Image: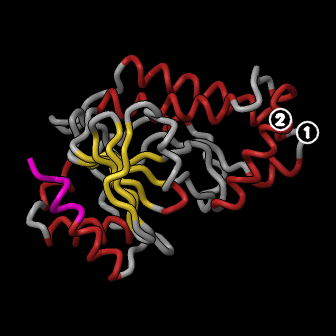
Amino acid sequence: MDNNTIKPTAKLEQMKNEVEEMHERILKYCKINKELDDIYKGRVIYWSQLFINPSILYFGINPGGSWGRLVEKEYLEPYPKKRTDDDPFKKDLRECFNAIKKPEYMETMVFTNRYFFATDNTNTLEQFFKIIEDNYSEIGFKEKYEYKNKQVEWTRTFINELLPKIIIAGGMYLKNRFNPIFPDNKKTLHDSKNIRVLEINGYKLIVYRRVHNSMSNETKDEFKECLREYTQE
């Protein structure tokens, strides 16, 4: 583990245990619900190392399903070393931070997702929500929206425990999905077809449009201007 990384805090460990408990319930229900079994691909919490006060806390939508079902325990833990892959969204972010002369922001990026449970795409994610909500008592949940409410709590925990400099979310699907995190302490600072900037509980959150995991040139230009404005120390 690198010197400036951290192990999960007690609250993040509690979150991990809750995620795993929910995952086990869903797997059990997959045995009697073929539709859920077909679309549910497992759970992942971390896609990076873990840093305290990271420059960027990055939220994707949810893990994709291209790796098969993600059931190994390693998917609940931070990466032990820096990832060397260069996904299209990372290339876009690096280009934008280089353009505003703040390349160091990419060095301590923590990458997670707004929703931890994996499906192939947002359409199947919506199917997942519906199956869970329609069958919540059979799965063993106490409330219809227990999963969504827990995911709100987990997202809030991530933000409060890590204290990032800036929060970035990839995909306009997430445009309104941070509203419940700090419902009494949020305001919109910028809103267009490509970018939405919120201030939530004192943190700047930039949600940007991406297509096939990449930004268009138009989105990049607007994103860079937002970075210049909202990453001022």
Q: CA distance from mark 2 to mark 1?
A: 6 Å
Please report contact status of discs 2 and 1: CB closer than 8 Å, yes or no.
Answer: yes
Which residue appears at 72% of the width and 58% of the height? 124
The amino acid beneath tag 1 is Ile
Task: Provide the residue span drawn in magenta.
Answer: 226-233
Q: 207 or 45: which is nearer to us? A: 207
Rendered position, 29 above or below 112? above
- Main SS class of the magenta portion in the image: helix
- Label of residue 81 in the image: none
Provide residue 16's location: percent of width, then percent of height: 51, 27
Residue 76 in magenta stretch: no
Q: Which residue is mark 1?
A: 32
Q: Is residue 227 within the magenta segment?
A: yes
Q: How is the image coloured?
A: secondary structure
In the image: residue 118, left or right of residue 50: right
Specify the quadrant of the image occupied by residue 18. top right
Tell me if residue 202 comes above or below residue 93 in the rendering: above
Q: On screen, 84 above or below 219?
A: above
